C-alpha cells in the first residue's frame, strides 16, 4: 500500500484501460443526456449507478444522484409514496451504490462524501458503518478517508471519545507507522483535555503518558516519521502559551526619549540611541505581541499622557496582508501641541490587557495586564542647520563605521523587554512540570542520537533545546537554572544542512532565527554588532548607531522584538531571500540589503510599511532574475482588488515603456519617500526602470551613488 | 501381527522404488518420486502414518516409545534361486523412557490427544517446508494456526516476550528505550544486508566471524544478544562459552536464521507471528505427503513389517524385500526408515554400530491444565544455556500447544520439551530442570498441597499431570545400495531434514526434478475442509 514505487503501466494494461474507457464513453454520454434533461427515472439512475461502479471518481454522477434523490423525495408526496419504508429503501440503494464504488476504489472522495450525505439525511441505520470501516481499514490501515469517515460515524453514533481513543491505541500497537491513527489520537485527546473528562486531568499527567507511548515508537524506529509528528503535537501542547502576550514595545519601559522636530538634534550631547529626528512631529509607539493579534484599539489600549489623546489614537496593524491581524501594532503620539514645554519631561503611560478584546487567531484573549512608561523630551527647534544635515549621502563603506565608545555602552538605553513576558508563575506545579518534561525529553533524544543518526531526531532536539531556553528565560528568580543552548542548536542545524541537502533552506532559516536570537539575547552581545556611523569624508558630526549584521549567512530575520529601536540596519552580505518581520521596525531610516538573495520585489513588501525609510540599498540581489515568483499570490496586485489601493499607473507613463510591467515595484515604492536608493547589479535595474523609479519617487537625491540634479 | 498373513498379495511386485517407514523424509521421497512418475511401494510396519514423526494418542505414544526394542540378531536364511533373504534388524531409537502419571485424567482421555513424537516442532511461515507444501499441493490437506507468542527466560528466571518484530518491539515493556533502538536498528541492518544492496552488505570478514562476536561488535547489550541468539536464531549451544559450544553459530548463518524469522512475520495475512503449527499435530505432515503420493499412484500398505532384504548372491546388491506376509517385492532402489540396520552385503561385521551417530536429543511431553503464561494458549518458551542451572550447555525449547490445535482435550495443555545432549544424564538433567522451572509437581501422597507454604506473591505454577521424558538417538541420511532416512533432529523446524531428503532424492534420481512446478486444479481442491478458525496456507 505504502512505500511502493508506482510502476508505469504495461502495454497490456494500457490496452485494457483504453478498452474500459471506450466502453464507458457511451454510458457517460447517455448519463449526461439524462442529467441535462433532468431525467430521474429508474433507468437513468441505473445508468448512473453502472457508471459510478466503473468510475467512482466521477463527481458529476454523484451530484446527479443527490439531485435525483431530492427530486424523487419531493415528487413522491403527490403520489402518496412517503411512507418511511420507501424512503428508507431509496437511501439504502444509495448506500449500496457507495459501498460498491468504494469496493472498487476505497479512496474515492465522491463515494465517501455521498455516503456521508446519505447518513446525514438520517433515514438509514448507522449500525453497519463501523463494521464496514473495519473492512476498509484492514485493507489499508492508514487510509485517511476511512479515518475521517470514522470520526464522522463516531460523532453520529455518539461514541465516546474514550472509546475512539482506545481504538487508536489498538491500531497503533498493531502498527505504529500510521499517520492517520496518530492524527486521530491528537484530535480526540484535544477534545478530552479541553472538556477535562474524568481521567484526562490534569493535562500534565495525560501528556506524560502520551510522551511515554510515542517514545516507544520513536525509539523502535527513529526513521519512521509518523510518531514524530505526534511528538511535535505533544511538544506544542506542552510549551504553548495560550493567551497572546505583549512582549516588547517602543519606546521601552522606563526610557527617556529626546526628539527634535526638524533634524537639528545636538547629537554630540545626547546619546544617538535615544535621540530621534522626527520631522513628522509625532512619536511612533509600537506594541509587539507574542503572536499576531487583532482588536488593538483605543478601547483596549489605554494611553495616559499630558497629551491626553488616548481617545483619538488610531492603532494600525503592521502587516502586509489585509487580515487586520498583526504581531506589531503602531500608533503615533502627536507632541506638537501648544501646551508642550520644550526640554521638559513629558511622561507617557501605556497599559494593555486591562480589558478583553485583543485576541489571537485561535481566539485566546490577551488577559495579562501589562503596563509601560516612558518620558519624552522635545528639543527646541534650531532651524539654522536644517537643510545641511538632510542632504548627506549615506555611504555603507566599512571606514564609516566605528566601534561604539564605552560611554555609549554604559549609558546604553537598549531595554530588554523580558519583564513584559514574565507573567508565568515560576513556582507553579504546571511550570515545574513543563520544565521537567522538556528536560526529560532533551535527555532522551540526546540518548537516541547517540544510538542512531536520525535527522528528525536532531531537528526535534534543536526544537526542544530552544523551547527549554524560552521557558527558563521567563524564570527570573534562579539564573543558575538557566542553561543556554544556542551553540548546540546552531551546530545541530549546521549538521542538518549538510546531511539533508533537499531541506537545507528550511534548516538555514531556522539557523538564522536561532543565530539572531543568540545575538540579541543580551545587551552585551547585541552591542558588539552596533557601530557608530560617521562619514569620514564629511565634517558632519551627524551620526546614527548602526546595527551591522553582515556576513552571517542568515537567510531570514527574526528577534524583531529586541530590535524595535534600530534606525540604521546593515544586513548586507547574507543570504536573505525574505525580509518578513522588518515591517515592525518603524524607526528604520537607513537599510542595507545589498549582496543578498532577494529574488523579487514582492519579497520586499514589508518595506512599504516603513514610512521613515530614507536610504535603501538593494544592490547586488537577484531581483528580476527569477521568472517565476512563487510568493506573488501572497502579495497585493492589481488583480487582488485590495481595498484602498489605487493603481494610477497612467501618471507615470514613460514613452515606450509599459509601466504595468513594473507594478510590483510601483506597489512597494509608491508610498516611500526615499532620498537614496542603490539598486545596481539586479537584473531588473535597467535604465528604463531607473527612469520609472525617479518619476515614482521625486524625493530621490541619489541613485546608485549618482547625485541627481 | 498375524493378520498380515491375511493381507491380499501386493500387485504388482516390481517397483521403481520401495520405501519402508512413513516418517516425513520417507513420505516426501514417496511423494516426490510418484510426482516424477516413478512406481513406488510405501510400506510401514506400524498401523499409523508418520513413524518417528507421527502424532499419537497418549497410550499409543507410550507404547510406541517402549516397544522400540532391538530385534534379534540377523540370521540369513537361504532363499531359492539367486537371491538370499537377509533378515532385517532394527535398533533402539528411544532410551531412558520415563513416564510419570500424577493424575489419571490424561489417561482417561487418551484418545483425545495427538502427541508429537518429535516435538517441539513448528514451521516458520517462510520455511522451505512451507514452500514445499505449497508447491507439492500437500498444503491442501492441512490447516495451520499461529503460535501466539514466544517467550525467553531472562537471566532472572522470568519469562519475557521475545521482541521479534517492529510492533513487538514497540509493545515490549521489558526493553529500555535505547535497547529498542539498538534492536530494531540491528534488524534493519540485517534487512539491508539481505536486500543485496552493496553499500549495506555486512563485510565478508564479519560474516565468517562468530555471530556472538558480531553482535558484540554491533554494541548490542547482553540481554539483546541473548534474545537474538537463542530466541530468534535458535542457537542450541552456549555461544559465549567456547569450551562447551559444539556448534558456534557463524554470523552468516545467524543472519540467515534471522532472515527466516523476519520474512516469516507477515508472510500470511492470517498468521499473527512467525510460527505456525498444524492442527492435529505434526503427524499431519507425513500423512499429507503420503496422500499426495497416493494421488500420484504410490501404493500404500500399513501394518506390513519387512522381514528381510533380498540379496543378489552374484552381484552382491539388494534386489527387493520380503514382507511379513511372505511375499517378495522387487525394486532396484530401496529406502529404509532410520531404525532399520542395513546389513552390509559385503562385510558382515559390526552390524550393531549406528551409522554416523550425531548425538542425542532429550525430549519431553508434559500435560497440564494451566498455561505457562496466563491468557496464552499456544506459545514457544526458550530456556537458553545457563538460564536453568550453571552447567546447562544447550538451550531447552518448550512448545505449549492448547486444545485449539486439537492436540489435547479442551482445558488441557501439552508442553513439548527438547534439548540436545551428549548422553542421557546430561539430557535428562536439562529436561528435569526445565520441568521443575515450569511446573509444580505433586508430591505423591499429598496431592494438591505440595506448594501451600510457598509465598503467595509468586505466580502459581501449572501443576504437572502426566509426563514422558525420553532420549532419542539421531541419525543422518545415507545413500548406498539401500538408503536410510534421518531421525527427527533437534531443531525447531524441518529445514535440515528437508535439505537432506532433497539431496537423497537427487542422488537416487539424478535426472528427475524434485517436485516439478505444476498448477493444482485437481478435484482434491474441493476436499479442503475449512474449519472456521483454521488457516490454510495461501500465498
Image (spheres, rainbow, N blue to C red):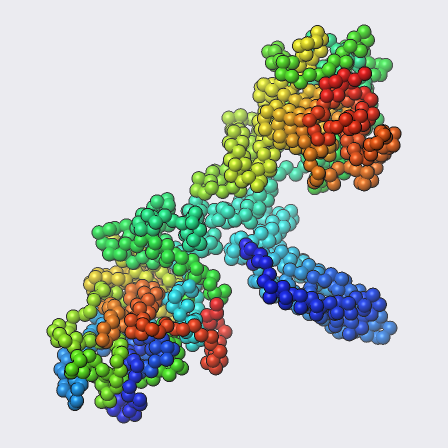
Q: Is residue A416 left or right of residue A319?
A: left
Instruction: Name the spot of residue B263 as percent of width and height, x first.
Output: 43, 59
Res A282 quadrant in image: top right
Task: Return the x and y of residue B64 as percentages of the image width and height.
Answer: 26, 77
The residue depicted at 41 percent of the width and 68 percent of the height is B130
Q: Position of residue B51 (x, y in %)?
A: 29, 76
Q: Nearer the viewer, residue B400 or A218?
A: A218
Q: Is residue A292 visible?
A: yes
**Residue closest to the eye, B240 or B149:** B240
Specify the quadrant of the image occupied by residue B492: bottom left
Residue at 63% over, 66% down: A15
- Residue B27 appears left or right of A101: left
Q: Residue B297 location in percent, x, y?
A: 37, 83
- At x 83%, y 65%, the residue is A36
Check the image and name the residue furthest to the left: B349
Q: Between B458 and B538, which is closer to the camera in this rendering?
A: B538
For the N terminus of chain B, give its image quadrant: bottom left
Q: Could you tell whether B511 is left or right of B524 in the image?
A: left
Vertical order, A66 against A541 (above or below): below
Which residue is painted at 57% across and 58% down in the image? A7
Would you say residue A370 is visible in this rendering?
A: no
Amino acid at each position: 500500500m505504502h512505500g511502493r514505487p508506482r510502476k508505469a503501466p504495461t502495454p497490456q494494461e494500457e490496452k485494457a484501460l483504453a478498452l474500459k474507457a471506450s466502453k464507458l464513453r457511451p454510458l457517460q454520454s447517455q448519463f449526461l443526456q439524462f442529467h441535462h434533461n433532468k431525467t430521474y427515472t429508474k433507468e437513468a439512475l441505473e445508468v448512473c449507478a453502472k457508471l459510478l461502479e466503473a468510475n467512482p471518481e466521477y463527481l458529476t454522477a454523484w451530484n446527479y444522484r443527490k439531485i435525483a434523490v431530492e427530486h424523487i423525495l419531493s415528487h413522491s408526496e403527490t403520489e402518496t409514496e412517503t411512507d418511511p419504508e420507501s424512503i428508507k429503501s431509496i437511501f439504502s440503494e444509495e448506500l449500496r451504490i457507495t459501498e460498491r464504488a468504494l469496493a472498487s476504489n476505497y479512496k474515492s472522495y465522491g463515494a465517501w462524501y455521498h455516503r456521508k450525505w446519505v447518513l446525514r439525511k438520517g433515514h438509514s441505520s448507522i449500525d453497519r458503518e463501523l463494521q464496514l470501516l473495519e473492512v476498509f481499514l484492514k485493507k489499508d490501515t492508514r487510509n485517511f478517508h476511512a479515518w475521517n469517515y470514522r470520526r464522522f460515524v463516531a460523532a453520529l453514533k455518539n461514541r465516546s471519545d474514550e472509546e475512539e481513543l482506545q481504538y487508536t491505541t489498538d491500531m497503533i500497537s498493531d502498527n505504529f507507522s500510521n499517520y492517520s491513527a496518530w492524527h486521530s489520537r491528537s484530535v480526540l485527546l484535544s477534545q478530552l483535555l479541553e472538556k477535562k473528562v474524568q481521567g484526562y486531568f490534569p493535562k500534565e499527567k495525560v501528556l506524560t503518558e502520551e510522551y511515554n507511548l510515542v517514545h516507544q515508537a520513536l525509539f523502535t524506529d527513529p526513521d519512521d516519521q509518523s510518531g514524530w509528528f505526534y511528538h511535535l503535537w505533544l511538544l506544542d501542547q506542552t510549551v504553548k502559551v495560550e493567551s497572546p502576550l505583549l512582549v516588547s514595545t517602543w519606546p521601552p519601559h522606563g526610557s527617556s526619549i529626546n526628539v527634535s522636530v526638524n533634524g537639528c538634534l545636538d547629537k554630540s550631547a545626547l546619546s544617538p540611541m535615544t535621540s530621534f529626528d522626527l520631522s513628522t512631529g509625532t512619536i511612533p509607539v509600537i506594541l509587539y505581541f507574542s503572536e499576531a493579534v487583532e482588536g488593538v484599539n483605543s478601547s483596549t489600549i489605554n494611553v495616559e499622557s499630558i497629551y491626553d489623546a488616548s481617545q483619538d489614537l488610531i492603532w494600525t496593524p503592521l502587516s502586509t496582508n489585509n487580515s487586520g491581524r498583526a504581531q506589531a501594532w503602531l500608533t503615533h503620539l502627536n507632541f506638537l501641541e501648544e501646551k508642550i514645554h520644550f526640554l521638559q519631561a513629558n511622561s507617557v503611560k501605556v497599559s494593555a490587557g486591562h480589558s478583553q478584546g485583543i485576541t489571537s487567531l485561535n481566539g485566546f484573549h490577551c488577559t495579562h495586564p501589562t503596563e509601560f512608561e516612558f518620558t519624552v523630551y522635545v528639543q527646541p527647534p534650531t532651524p539654522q542647520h536644517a537643510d545641511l544635515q538632510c542632504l548627506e549621502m549615506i555611504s555603507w563603506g566599512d571606514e564609516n563605521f566605528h566601534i561604539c565608545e564605552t560611554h555609549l555602552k554604559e549609558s546604553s538605553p537598549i531595554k530588554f523587554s523580558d519583564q513584559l513576558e514574565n507573567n508565568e508563575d515560576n513556582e507553579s506545579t504546571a511550570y515545574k512540570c513543563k520544565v521537567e518534561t522538556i528536560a526529560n525529553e532533551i535527555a532522551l533524544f540526546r540518548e537516541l542520537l547517540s544510538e542512531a543518526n536520525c535527522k528528525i531526531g536532531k531537528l526535534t532536539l534543536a526544537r526542544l533545546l530552544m523551547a527549554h531556553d524560552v521557558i527558563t528565560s521567563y524564570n527570573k528568580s534562579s539564573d543558575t537554572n538557566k542553561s543556554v543552548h544556542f551553540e548546540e542548536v546552531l551546530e545541530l542545524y549546521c549538521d542538518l544542512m549538510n546531511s539533508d541537502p533537499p531541506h537545507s533552506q528550511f534548516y538555514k532559516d531556522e539557523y538564522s532565527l536561532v543565530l539572531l536570537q543568540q545575538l540579541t539575547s543580551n545587551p552585551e552581545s547585541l552591542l558588539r554588532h552596533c557601530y557608530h556611523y560617521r562619514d569620514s569624508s564629511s565634517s558632519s558630526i551627524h551620526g546614527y548607531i548602526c546595527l551591522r549584521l553582515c556576513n552571517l549567512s542568515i537567510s531570514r530575520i527574526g528577534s524583531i522584538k529586541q530590535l524595535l529601536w534600530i534606525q540604521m540596519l546593515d544586513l548586507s552580505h547574507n543570504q536573505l531571500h525574505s525580509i518578513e518581520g522588518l515591517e515592525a521596525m518603524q524607526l528604520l531610516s537607513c537599510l542595507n540589503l545589498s549582496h543578498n538573495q532577494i529574488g523579487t520585489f514582492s519579497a520586499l513588501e514589508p518595506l512599504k510599511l516603513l514610512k521613515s525609510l530614507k536610504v535603501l540599498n538593494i544592490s547586488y540581489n537577484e531581483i528580476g532574475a527569477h521568472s517565476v515568483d512563487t510568493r506573488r499570490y501572497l502579495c497585493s496586485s492589481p488583480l487582488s482588488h485590495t481595498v484602498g489601493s489605487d493603481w494610477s499607473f497612467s501618471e507615470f507613463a514613460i514613452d515606450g515603456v509599459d509601466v504595468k510591467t513594473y507594478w510590483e515595484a510601483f506597489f512597494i515604492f509608491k508610498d516611500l519617500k526615499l532620498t537614496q536608493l542603490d539598486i545596481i547589479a539586479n537584473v531588473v535595474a535597467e535604465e528604463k526602470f531607473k527612469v520609472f523609479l525617479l518619476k515614482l519617487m521625486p524625493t530621490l537625491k541619489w541613485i546608485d551613488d549618482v547625485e541627481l540634479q | 501381527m498375524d493378520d498380515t498373513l491375511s493381507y491380499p498379495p501386493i500387485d504388482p511386485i516390481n517397483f521403481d522404488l520401495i520405501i519402508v517407514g512413513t516418517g516425513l523424509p520417507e513420505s516426501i521421497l514417496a511423494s516426490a518420486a510418484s510426482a516424477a512418475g516413478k512406481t513406488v511401494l510405501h510400506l510401514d510396519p506400524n498401523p499409523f502414518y508418520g513413524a518417528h514423526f507421527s502424532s499419537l494418542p497418549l497410550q499409543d505414544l507410550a507404547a510406541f516409545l517402549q516397544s522400540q526394542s532391538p530385534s534379534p540378531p540377523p540370521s540369513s536364511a537361504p532363499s531359492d534361486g539367486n537371491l538370499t533373504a537377509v533378515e532385517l534388524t532394527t535398533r533402539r531409537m528411544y532410551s531412558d523412557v520415563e513416564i510419570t502419571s500424577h493424575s489419571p485424567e490424561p489417561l482417561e482421555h487418551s484418545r483425545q490427544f495427538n502427541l508429537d513424537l518429535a516435538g517441539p516442532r513448528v514451521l516458520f511461515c517462510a520455511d522451505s517446508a512451507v514452500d514445499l507444501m505449497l508447491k507439492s499441493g500437500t498444503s491442501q490437506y492441512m490447516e495451520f494456526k499461529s503460535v501466539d507468542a514466544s517467550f525467553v527466560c531472562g537471566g532472572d528466571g522470568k519469562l519475557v516476550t521475545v521482541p521479534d518484530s517492529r510492533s513487538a518491539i514497540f509493545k515490549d515493556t521489558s526493553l529500555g528505550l535505547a535497547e529498542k533502538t539498538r534492536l530494531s536498528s540491528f534488524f534493519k541492518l540485517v534487512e539491508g544486508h539481505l536486500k543485496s544492496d552493496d553499500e549495506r552488505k555486512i563485510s565478508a570478514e564479519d560474516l565468517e566471524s562468530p555471530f556472538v562476536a558480531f553482535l558484540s561488535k554491533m554494541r548490542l547489550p547482553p540481554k539483546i544478544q541473548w534474545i537474538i541468539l537463542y530466541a530468534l536464531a535458535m542457537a542450541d549451544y552456549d555461544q559465549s562459552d567456547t569450551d562447551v559450544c559444539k556448534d558456534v553459530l557463524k554470523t552468516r548463518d545467524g543472519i540467515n536464521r534471522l532472515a527466516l524469522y523476519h520474512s516469516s512475520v507477515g508472510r500470511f495475512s492470517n498468521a499473527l507471528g512467525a510460527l505456525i503449527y498444524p492442527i492435529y499435530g505434526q503427524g499431519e505432515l507425513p500423512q499429507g505427503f503420503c496422500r499426495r503420493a497416493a494421488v500420484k499412484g504410490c501404493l500404500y500398505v500399513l501394518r506390513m513389517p519387512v522381514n528381510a532384504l533380498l540379496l543378489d548372491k552374484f552381484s552382491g546388491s539388494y534386489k527387493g524385500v520380503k514382507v511379513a506376509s511372505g511375499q517378495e517385492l522387487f525394486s532396484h532402489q530401496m529406502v529404509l526408515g532410520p531404525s532399520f540396520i542395513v546389513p552390509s552385503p559385503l562385510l558382515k561385521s559390526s552390524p550393531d554400530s549406528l551409522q554416523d551417530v550425531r548425538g542425542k536429543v532429550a525430549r519431553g511431553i508434559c500435560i497440564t491444565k494451566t498455561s505457562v503464561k496466563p491468557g496464552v494458549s499456544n506459545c514457544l518458551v526458550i530456556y537458553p544455556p545457563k538460564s536453568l542451572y550453571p552447567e546447562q550447555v544447550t538451550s531447552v525449547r518448550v512448545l505449549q500447544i492448547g486444545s485449539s490445535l486439537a492436540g489435547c482435550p479442551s482445558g488441557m495443555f501439552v508442553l513439548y520439551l527438547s534439548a540436545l545432549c551428549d548422553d542421557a544424564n546430561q539430557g535428562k538433567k536439562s529436561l528435569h530442570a526445565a520441568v521443575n522451572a515450569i511446573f509444580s509437581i505433586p508430591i505423591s501422597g499429598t496431592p494438591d498441597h505440595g506448594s501451600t507454604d510457598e509465598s503467595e506473591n509468586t505466580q502459581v505454577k501449572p501443576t504437572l499431570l502426566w509426563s514422558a521424558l525420553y532420549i532419542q538417538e539421531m541419525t543422518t541420511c545415507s545413500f548406498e545400495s539401500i538408503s536410510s532416512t534421518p531421525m527427527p533432529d533437534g531443531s525447531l523446524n524441518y529445514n535440515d531434514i528437508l535439505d537432506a531428503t532433497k539431496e537423497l532424492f537427487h542422488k537416487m534420481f539424478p535426472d528427475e526434478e524434485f517436485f516439478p512446478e505444476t498448477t493444482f486444479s485437481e478435484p482434491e481442491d474441493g476436499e479442503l475442509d475449512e474449519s472456521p478458525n483454521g488457516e490454510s496456507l495461501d500465498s
